[in-house]
Image (cartoon, grey):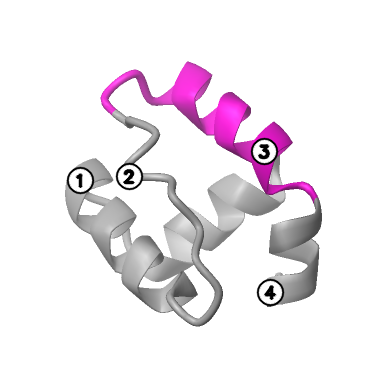
Amino acid sequence: MNTTELKGNWNEQKGKLKKKFAVLTDNDLMFEEGKKEEMFGKLQIKLGKSKEELDKIIAAL
C-alpha cells in the first residue's frame, strides 16, 4: 500500500484497526507525512507482528 492510498482512507482503516486491536490508541495510529515507517514500526512492536503480517492486516481491512 502506498502513502497516497494510506492517506486517502486512513481514518476508516484506523477505526477498523482499533476495533480489531483494542490495545491501539489514536496516538499509535497517528499518520504523519514522511513518518509512515516510524508508525508501522511502533505498531509492529505493540502488536507483536512482523511488517509483512501488519501489511496483510491493513490490506484486508
Q: Quadrant of the C terminus?
A: top right
Circle 1/circle 2 CB separation < 8 Å = yes
Q: Between marks 3 and 1, how big is the CA–CA gap?
A: 20 Å
Q: Amino acid at mark 2?
A: Asp
Q: Is residue 30 left or right of residue 48?
A: right
Q: What percent of the width, then of the height, locates residue 3?
A: 68, 74
Q: Between marks 1 and 2, how big is the CA–CA gap?
A: 9 Å
Q: Which residues are magenta?
A: 9-23
Q: What percent of the width, then of the height, locates residue 45?
A: 18, 55
Circle 1 crowding by C-alpha within 10 Å: few under 14, some 14–19, many from 20: few
Q: Between marks 4 and 1, how big is the CA–CA gap?
A: 21 Å
Name the residue: 67% across, 38% down: 11
In magenta segment, residue 3: no
Name the residue: 29% across, 67% down: 41
The residue singled out by tag 1 in the image is 46
Circle 4/circle 1 CB separation < 8 Å = no
The residue singled out by tag 3 in the image is 11
Name the front one of labels 4 and 1.
Answer: 4
